[in-house]
Image (tube, helix red, strand yellow):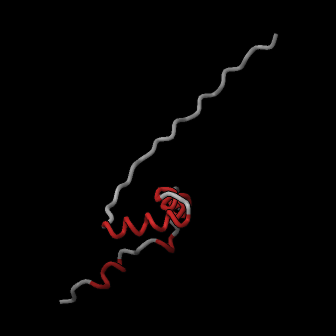
Amino acid sequence: MPVKKKKKKKKAVKYKSITFKLSSTQKKSLGNYCKARKTTPTKLMKKLLKPFLQNYSEKVPKEYQVSERQLDMFGDEE
């Protein structure tokens, strides 16, 4: 009889929560949009954020980084 192998335990995914506030008009608008598209607000937001959540997990490319000198452009020149 063959020996049964132990199944590898799956690594548990740790989720973090993010909250933000919407006005009542914005919430109503979001609800109407989701109802028309037959989706939920959570699925909609995850779909829209997916490119940012997957592409920059390791390192942000230089072209998207703000240089230190750029912050001084709008400073007071006295």
The percent position of residue 64, horizontal first and vertical second, equals 48, 72
Q: Is residue 59 visible?
A: no
x and y percentages locating residue 8 in the rendered image: 63, 28
Kindly give the residue lying farthest to the left in the view shown.
78
User: Between 63 and 50, which is closer to the camera in this rendering?
Assistant: 50
Question: On the rendered image, what quadrant is the C terminus found in?
Answer: bottom left
Vertical comparison of 66 with 12: above or below: below
Kindly identify the residue that appears in the image at 31 percent across and 62 percent down. Answer: 21
Question: Is residue 62 in view from this perspective?
Answer: yes
Q: Residue at x 21, y 86 (%)?
A: 76
Name of the residue lying farthest toward the bottom: 78
- Give the number of marks: 0
Q: Quadrant of the N terminus?
A: top right
Across and down, in percent, residue 31 comes to: 43, 63
77 vs 35, nearest the viewer: 35
Vertical arrangement, residue 17 with respect to residue 23, above or below: above
Question: Position of 21 compared to 61: left or right?
Answer: left
Q: Residue at x 35, y 79 (%)?
A: 69
Q: Give whichever of 28, 3 is nearer the camera.
A: 28
Depth check, front residue: 34 or 69: 34
Outermost residue to the top: 1
